[in-house]
Each structure stands twice: as C-alpha cells, then as structure tokens.
Image (cartoon, grey):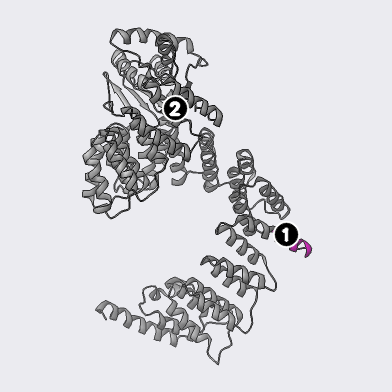
Amino acid sequence: MSGSCQLRTRRFSRFARNLAAASPPAPCSCPPSPSFFPEAETASCSTEFIDALCCRGFFHEAFDQCLRLRSLKAVRRLHSHLRSPLFNPPTTLFNRLIDAYCKCGSLVDARKMFDEMPHRDTCSFNTLMAGYSNAGDLAEARRLFDEIPVRDHFSWSSIIACYTRHKFPTQSLELYRRMLREMAAENSKYSNRFTASSALAASTAVLSLRHGREIHCHIVRAGLESDAVVWSALSDMYAKCGSIKNARQVFDLSSGQDVVSWTAMIGRYFDAGRRMEGLELFRHMFSTCVRPNDFTFAGVLDACSELAVEGLGRQVHGHMIRVGSDPSSFAASAVLHMYSKCGNIEKANIFFERMPNPDLVAWTSLISGFAQNGQPRKALHYYELLLESGIRPDNITFVGVLSACVHAGLVDKGIEIFNSIKEKFELRHTTDHYSCVVDLLSRAGRFQKAEEIINGMPLKPDKFLWASLLAGCRIHRNLKLAKRAAESLFEIEPENAATYVTLANIYASAGMWDEVVKIRRKMDERGVVKKPGSSWIEVKQKVHVFLVGDDSHLQAKQIYAFLDKLQIKMKEEGYVPDTNFVLHDIEEEQKENNLSYHSEKLAVAFGIIATPPGTSIRVFKNLRICGDCHTAFKFISNITGREIIVRDSNRFHKFKNGDCSCGDYW
C-alpha cells in the first residue's frame, strides 16, 4: 500500500472510531447532511465508513455514500447490516437497497433483494422497474409493471417514459390512454407533470399533432397549465409536429418565462427553418428582464451564420462582451464560426488569437473557415499549429483540412493527410473523408484513382460523394463517369433537382441537346422542380433578396440600367459570356440575355449602387455560383474597384482586381 493510501486509511479509521463513540441522533432530529462527513469524500476504504454509519443507525446517509461512490462493494456491505437478526428494517430501506443495486450496476442483486423482501409496496415495483428501464430491459420492465397490485402515477410515468426512451412511442401513447381510462374509472386525477411530459414526447416522436392536441386537453383538465416543464414539452410538441404558430401561442401564454424557455422557443423557430422569426424573437427578448445565456447566444449565432447576417451577429457578439460571457465557452466558438461563415475570416482570425484557451471546436472552425474563404494554405498552417499545440484532431477537423487541400488543388498533400487519419491518428475514415478525397481527385481529373477509392471503401458511398464525383465530371466533361454518378444519385435522392441540372449542363456543354430534353422530360415525369436560385445582400442592416430576372425590388430600374452599362464596359475589357451555362438550344444573343440577370448579378449591382465607393460587397447565394457569373465578377471587381465577396453553397469567392481567391479552382 502506498504511503498516501496508508495515511488516508489511518485518518479514516480514527474518524470511524470517533463516529462509533458519538451519541446516537435524537429520534426526531434532522438526519446529517452529506457534508456532515467530509472525510468520507476522500476515504479509500468505504466499507469501514459504511460500517460506522450503520452502527449508529445512519442508514440513509450510508445509502447516499454508496451512491456517491457508485460502489457495489459498499452496497453489499450495507446489505449485510440490514440482514442482522437483531434488526427488522422497514420496507423503505429495502427499496433504497434495490435502488442502490440498480444504480451500481447489479440488476441481479436488485432482483434477488426484491424477491426476498418480506413485504413489497408499489415503490418496490417502481424502483426495480426503473432499474430495468434504465438498463434497456424493456420486456422485464413491462413484466414488473403488469404485476404491480396498485399502480401510482410514478408507475405509469416510468413505463410510459421507458417506451418513449426506447423508441416505442406508439406503445407509450397506448399506455397513456389506458392510464386515463383506469384513472377516470377511479375518479382519480387525470395526469401529472411526468406522465404528461412523457406522453407529449411520444406524440412528438410519431409527429402526431392529433394525439398532441388530445394530451393538451388532458393537461388543461388536470390543471397543469402553470407547470413550466409540461408547458415547454407542449410547445416543443407543436413545433416539431409542424405547428410553430401553436408552439408560439403556448409560449406566449406560459407564466414565469425564463432564459430556458426563451432559448427553447427561439431554437424552435430555427429548427423549423424560420430563422428570421427566431432572430426577431431574440430581439424581443431584450425588451424583457430575461438575460440571454451562452446557449441562447450560440443558437442565435448559428442562425446568423446560416443566414449570413453579420450585422446582427456583431450585435450579439457585442452583447456577449457587455454581459461578460466566458471567452473560452462554446458560445465563443460560435462567434468565431459566425464571422467565418459570413466571410469575415480576418475578424474570425483576430477573435481566435484573443481566445485564452481555444478548444478543438475553435481550431476546427478556423481551419474550415480559411478553407472555405479561399485561404487553404492558411488552413493547413493552422492545422500544423494545432498539432504542435498537443490537441488531438478529430474526424470533423480532418474534413476541414481535406477541404483546404481540395480548394488549393493539393492532391498529393490531401492523399497524405487522408492516409494519416487511419495510420497516424488511428481514426476510422468517415464518408465525409471519402467525399473530400474523391472531390480532390475528380477535380484534378484523376478519375481512375477516384474510382479505385470508391470501389475499395468499406462504407457505402453517400450522396455527397457522388455529387463530388459528378462535379468533377462536369469540369472535365467525363460523360461516362457522370452517368454513373448521376444514376447513383437518382437512386439515393430522386427528388433532388441539382443532379438533373448538373447532368444536363454536361450534356449541353457537349452539344447533346436531345439528352438535355430527355433529362427535362424525366424531371417532369417525376415531379422534380428545380430549386430557384436566390441571392441576398445586407445593406444598412436590411436584407435584400433577389431571384433570377427579379423586377420586384424598389430600385429594379436602376439595377438593370447599371447592369446594362456594366455589360458594355465588361465586353470592352474582353469579357465573353459563357453561354454553356444556358440549358436551351436557342440563339446565342438570347443566351447572353438569359445570363445577364442571374440573382447574384442583381444583388452585386444593387450593392454597388447602394453603398459608398470602396465598400466591399458581400453577397450570399443558396446554390452554386455559375461559371459565367464567376467570370463576370472578376471583370466587375476590376472595373468598379470593389472587393466582391460571394458565398455560394460550396465556398467563398473573393473577387478583387480581376482575380478570385479560389484561383478558378472550384
């Protein structure tokens, strides 16, 4: 035994002797709190301490100590004291013993204790049933439930929650209805907060708004409207079942709204894809006395990232500084991610450098940010710094690192890092890793190597991998492999219009218009509708959205007139419209007109006329930027002297002085 262990043992033995010599507590006195025995927290020999407690009648404190230590040995020692022939313990102590055995991982001992009990009450059944439920033994939990002579609310709540937790929501709802019938026959109270919450969770799992509304009625009848837990579960049910309006009504009617309920409601808007309404509710939160916490900030910052509204993101960041948010918290990483996703990688980098102890999430956000913002070599530089820091990268980190290799066209470096994931870091390759390396190879035209990796991978290729391969085929006009990739994508997601459009683009570039017509016919037959391209720009804290050929904007005439003038100047500078991106067999002049008013061009034009000279233009698009717009923006940046930043569905493009940060490798 080590010296430190011997010292602890001597100190503990002395403490146990002193406790044994102490006077027993008065029958009506309050039991000692756990802190009454501070030396027990570090005692290495817990069984001696259990002996000392049991000798003085401190059984409940002994149970607390067993559970704190999670020591099966200590529980068995306590059990031996309860077996004393001079002691007739009450049922409550046996119930606690069952609970202790369950929580210390011995259902066998718990069941044996249950079977040996001279008298069992409802709590005995409930306790063992909860143990089986937590261990995942649903069949045994249900068997015990059916054997309970008199069920109480805990019995029902436990079994309903058990079925819900183990992904059997339909059975949960059936049990809930059965409970209501039995309790109605006994004129008992309909429900309590736990059964109602579990039943609502089951309704949410099956997305049954009808069942959810029924439970809502039962909640009102049971008088649970003021219960915050039930009300939150009810609002969550409505939101996840597609009725965000009802979810908001429940939230507005709830009493005692706190930061948890506010954060949850804001998150429900984000989950429903209604981010602007979620951000509006966040703004409204500031007019109340409720103070946002890190969870609120992180959720709102993620929404700002998705919508690319840096203005609001800056405000949130400023508020975090004012309230003294922890610069090392997960919310701080969300700030970094927001700046990165909004195209301000410089600000993200400054923020990262000021973090006292950046964690892996922060490192990964910065590396991915550099990769997406057209600075892949900086991404790789920070990857090397990450390794030097001693923090071990994970699978998500490697997605960012491999993406940097893709954007930089560093094929050999990418293959080296891909191999190191398994060989050096002993991690398993994910489908995302395979997608990145296939993207890397196919963009470089190394299709044979890409096919070898696809055919040899142990995982089933997903839609992202096939989409990466298809994109590479579009660049190099590899019709044969493009068909294979497209057919695989049609099997995985036949409703995704992007696959049809990309394949049609490849055929159009090859002048195979009959094949383009066949693809359009196939889209019509399958009811596939092309997702309309939209672009947006934030000017003076207001977001302006544009569609292709959009004339609904208040300044539409000025925008179109400005674009027409730009078109003339661009052609004088050598711009030639790339009509390969028009999927119609029509006259060349008409093709040029079709290209002139893409949504991203409208957004850029508005940004130029609506902001002072020299201001950077930041535009965001929901789809991939087309090749013609990419070429046009290089000319526009040179003619206007503006930096134009475009974030499409793939990455950031920074156009400045006639060049793009992607180096035309996209």
Residue at x-position 48% and y-position 82%: 78
Residue 134 spot, x, y in % from top left: 52, 66
Residue at x-position 68% and y-position 69%: 151
Residue at x-position 48% and y-position 22%: 517
Residue 548 spot, x, y in % from top left: 47, 19
The quarter of the picture where the C terminus appears is top left
Label 2 secondary element: helix
How many residues crowd mark 2 within 10 Å: few (<14), some (14–19), many (20+)? some
Residue 402's quadrant in the figure?
top left
Q: Which residue type does callout 1 highlight?
A: Leu
Q: Nearer the viewer, residue 112 or 293?
A: 112
Q: Nearer the viewer, residue 369 or 261?
A: 369
- Compared with 434, 603 (above or below) is above
- Furthest residue toward bottom: 85
Mark drawn on residue 501: 2
Q: Which residue type does callout 2 highlight?
A: Val
In the rendered structure, the answer to whether residue 302 lies left or right of residue 241 reads left
For disc 1, the marked residue is 180
Tell whether position 363 is magenta.
no
Judge depth for marks 1 and 2 and give the one in front.
2
Residue 451's quadrant in the figure?
top left
Q: Where are the magenta residues, as a range?
A: 178-191
Residue at x-position 57% and y-position 68%: 130
Q: Nearer the viewer, residue 75 or 596?
A: 596
- Compared with 528, 172 (above or below) is below
Is there any visible trace of residue 361 in the rendered image?
no
Residue 369 spot, x, y in % from top left: 32, 37
